[in-house]
Amino acid sequence: MTQPRLPTLELPACLDFLKLKNFPLRVYPAVNAPKRFENDTLYIYGPGPKGSVASFDVGCLITQIYLRFCNVHVDIVNGNEPDASPNKHLPFLVTVVGQVLAGQQIDQWIKDNEKDTPLGNEEDDAIAFMSMAQTKLHAAWLFSMWLEPLNYSTHASSFYYGHLPAPINSILASKKKDQVVEQLLTDRDVLSREEIYAQATEVLEALSVKLGDATFFYDKPQPT
């Protein structure tokens, strides 16, 4: 059974404007249009001492130095919001083509663009020294920053959470301090201030002996 056709209604000429021949009538710009990056951009904790672009956070600073050593020029944004990062940690990198990279992804991006300097035969030795630095030296920095009372109250809490209103800043700073304690206890039974600093001193002495009188490690003409 066929459906009856609906009648066609013709508007008089005086109501011709209601036909909406041009639709949409007006196009407004996007309210939340994504920002277009002109350069690769690194989001870090900042600003650094005296307003410098060098981050006060060791992890961010290491990435900044590595990019500089590899002659990779990026814009710097003081993000201070780790939740904006894919891995919930700063720094993270936004490339001009829209990639959002964090952690080891940044290192791989540098290698994929052939910006790093291969170590060749010294790679295994370098990895061993980097492992010592990342464990022993980083542990000493964490202890000094978060568990030394004066540093915690005057530097760590204000650097990382000073941009937040009270009491949220104090709550998050205390939570971060507890996380640092838990992290430091992953490879030791008790936290010994003297032991942590002594191990860091040993690593620094080993690095000093390894470098010797050379400007760069492994007698390279540039940083590795």
Image (cartoon, grey):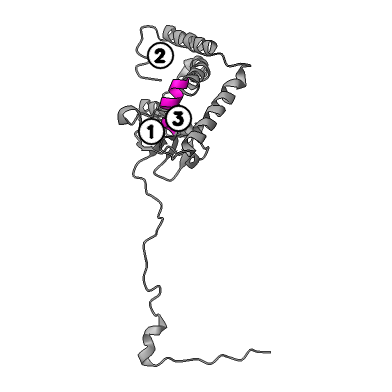
In the rendered image, residue 65, in percent from the top left (x then y), is placed at 38, 26
Identify the secondary structure beneath mark 1. loop
Q: Which residue is mark 1?
A: 46
**Amino acid type, callout 1:** Gly
Earlier-in-chain disc, 3 versus 1: 1
**Amino acid type, callout 2:** Phe
Identify the secondary structure beneath mark 3. helix
Q: Which residue is mark 3?
A: 157
Q: Taking 131 as reference, is 52 left or right?
A: left
Q: Is residue 213 magenta?
A: no
Q: Taking 70 as reference, is 125 left or right?
A: right
Q: Which residue is mark 2?
A: 217
Q: Taking 90 as reference, is 47 left or right?
A: left
**Residue 31 visible in the shown view:** yes
In the rendered image, residue 182, in percent from the top left (x then y), is placed at 59, 25
Q: CA distance from mark 2 to mark 1?
A: 29 Å
**Amino acid type, callout 3:** Ser
